[in-house]
Amino acid sequence: MSLETAAWFPIGTRLAVSMMDPASGGALEVIGDVVRDAVAPSWSLGILVIEPPHEWSALVAAAARRSAPGIEKATKRYRVLVVGDDHRQRGAMALYVTSGWDVLFATDGESVAEAIENVDLDAVIAELDAEDPRVQPIMEGIRKLQPKARRIVRGAGKGSSELVHRFVERDSGLDALLDAITADIPTAPTAPLTTGP
């Protein structure tokens, strides 16, 4: 399997990869060993799948039927970091798996720092409610370390903060998230330059 990823794993690492089967709507997990490093510019990781389940063959066959030679997707493949509690991430997993984006997950400040150390992100999505006290420190850190990344909160409530580009309701689908990532958000005006006396 060739997997485009923002994460780096050394050759020989055993991974569990979960993916969504668009035909059945169910999740499928396969186990495999890394046999090719993900390196710039493609960041394509080679994984040898070990004893795949029967559903794997059906998924591969369906993907082969859907692919048409000579046709390329015109959409950009976004790199997105999703931050939140494990239970919120599991609940949103199907949404992110079907997005076609490179998605990293983090649950705390340490895993956020590790995730963004070597990866340029297009967006950071906090799977937290607007009034959650963790939103501000997470977004402050992202603004400092990844100033070009869109900062989005997906949860209950509508907040107002210069640290967050867009608040998206938890029940909103992928279109609302895509709009939040791609919307034309004006930059803050800069202060005029002053000269000394």
Image (cartoon, rainbow, N blue to C red):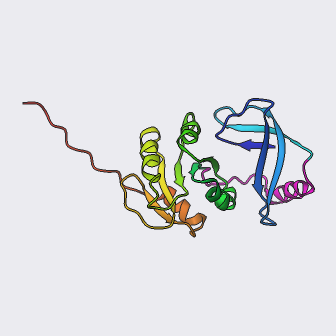
Rendering quarter of residue 39? top right
Q: Is residue 117 left or right of residue 12?
A: left
Residue 86 position (above or below residue 174): above
Magenta residue span: 52-77
User: Is residue 85 shown to the viewer in this render?
Assistant: yes
Q: Where residue 122 sits in the image (x, y, percent)?
A: 53, 47
Near-viewer residue (179 or 28): 28
Height in image: 113 above or below 60? above
Which of the image's four quarters has the C terminus? top left
Residue 30 in percent (x, y) is at 83, 48
Q: Dividing the image into 4 quarters, which one contains the N terminus?
A: top right
Residue at 85% in and 57% down: 59
Residue that protrudes farthest toward the front in the picture: 133
| Residue drawn at x 40%, y 63% as measured from the top left | 159
**Res. 96 image quadrant:** bottom right
- Please tell me whether residue 72 belongs to the stretch shown in magenta: yes
Q: State the image coordinates of residue 13 (x, y, percent, origin top left).
A: 78, 33
**Above/below status of 135 relative to 35:** below
In magenta segment, residue 63: yes
Q: Residue at x 91, y 53 (%)?
A: 53
Residue 124: image location, x then y, percent: 52, 50
Task: Answer left or right for 96 relative to 46.
Answer: left
